Image: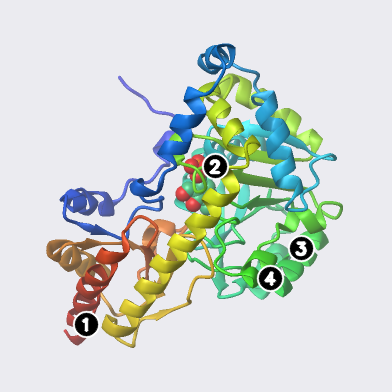
Amino acid sequence: MIRFSNNVSLLRTSEIRDLMSLATRPDMISFAGGMPGNELFPTEEVDEIYNSLPLDLKRTAFQYGPTPGFPPLLGVLKEFLRAKGLPVDTNELLITTGSLQAINILAKVFIDPGDVVVTENPCFIGAISAFQSFQGHLHGIDIDADGVLLDPLKAFLAQSREKAPKFFYSTPNFHNPAGILYSEERKNGLIEVLKEHQLPLIEDDAYGDLYFDEGAARTARPMKATYDQELPICYTGSFSKILGPGFRLGWMLAPREVYEKCELIKQSDDACSPTFTQVLAYEFVRSGRIHPYVAKMRGIYKRRKDTMVAAIHRYFPEEIKWVEPRGGFYMWCACPPELDLMAVLRASIEKGAVFVIGKTFDPKGTDNSHFRLAYSHTPEDKLERGIQIIGEALKDALRK
Ligand SMILES: Cc1ncc(COP(=O)(O)O)c(C=O)c1O
């Protein structure tokens, strides 16, 4: 007889998945996937990089590598992170197989069954699953346009003194799914609260480089860059959104004592992240190609966001509320609670446009009044038609 572990039995399957399988029509306009557009990848640059590698480096690329990462990549990545003000000399850097692995490793390092973990609500689904797979009990704190709400966070931490949570997980810059950027005040306030409770922070910065204006760039400064001395902060980042998710490369910058546990776990997890893509990423960063590429991506994502927002003004009913993103891939829409969002999704899919409903990103899985639009994957010429389809489905459902 097959008897599964408690860890895996706790993972949620979702009714949305069946619906999503209908959304694979080739002409479907997708606001669903949180990924870069296929046509945007730097394929020519990477061709050039691979073809000009010396033979011994090509051979190295095929081989296993050290668990912490390909040393030359660690070197250039440190400089990349130092430029963001991050304390790379007093912390340790670990290359991971996507930043999702960093989140999973941290979950394994911190969570015993039944431990409480505090997240934002909504929260990145990958983190929810990672924390639940180690039997963490998730408590989500609501957010607004400036970040996590501090009063409910304080109240929850005050009532949890008996059994203190293990950490707070946050995506302060261009949040997935909410698209928001924490204000400086909210970041400062959050750090004060966490300091008072000595609660470690996992700062997920997967989108921090994808800002749309200079003000947003300044506000997106990592909290770890400013507050490293005051609180244990494990900072994670990724090449997925600034080079390609297929590289499966992310990183974690963590205090030495946390890093040591993480490295041990990574040894048994996958021994090392792909050397092949680490060599390519190394050259991409070392040669400086990364900067013009990411600058170009910022421009493209901003134009996609602008086009989508213009279409939303035109086609969405006024009952739908949203905050204009200042970077990243996503916009989060709030609807009246009486709206049947599953019906809206079904109608949109029938007409040819798909998005993701909020329940997916709720640690408790109950949210029925939000949905996420990702504009990163959809070319500009399709965005307007897609928004028109969703807007009409929303209006029909609201008038019922
Ligand atoms: C907030 C956030 N963190 C982490 C990740 C994981 O990305 P990866 O494992 O590809 O680095 C994602 C991917 O969508 C994300 O949205």
Q: Is residue 123 visible?
A: no
Q: Element under label 2?
A: loop
Q: Nearest to the eye among marks 3 and 2: give it.
A: 2
- In this rendering, the answer to whether 143 lies above or below 240 is below
Q: Element under label 4?
A: helix
Residue 155's tag is: 4
Q: Is residue 9 visible?
A: yes
Ranked by sequence position, the earlier of labels 3 and 2 is: 3
Q: Are marks 1 and 4 in contact (CB under 8 Å)?
A: no
Question: In the depicted view, which residue is nearer to us: 151 or 92?
Answer: 92
Q: Nearest to the eye among marks 1 and 2: give it.
A: 2
Ranked by sequence position, the earlier of labels 1 and 4 is: 4
User: Dot 4: few (<14), some (14–19), or many (≥20) neighbours within 10 Å?
Assistant: few
Question: In the depicted view, which residue is nearer to us: 312 or 138?
Answer: 312
Q: Are marks 2 and 4 in contact (CB under 8 Å)?
A: no
Ranked by sequence position, the earlier of labels 4 and 3 is: 4
Residue 255's tag is: none
Ranked by sequence position, the earlier of labels 3 and 1 is: 3
Ranked by sequence position, the earlier of labels 1 and 2 is: 2
Marks 4 and 3, how far apart at CA? 15 Å
Residue 395's tag is: 1
Q: Are marks 3 and 1 in contact (CB under 8 Å)?
A: no
On whether ligand 1 comes within 8 Å of the CB at mark 3, the answer is no
Residue that numbered label 2 is attached to: 239
Q: What amino acid is at disc 4? A: Ala
How is the protein colored in the picture? rainbow
Residue that numbered label 3 is attached to: 191
Whole-percent x and y of residue 134? 54, 38
Q: What amino acid is at disc 3? A: Ile
Q: What amino acid is at disc 2? A: Phe
Q: Residue at x 56, y 75 (%)?
A: 144
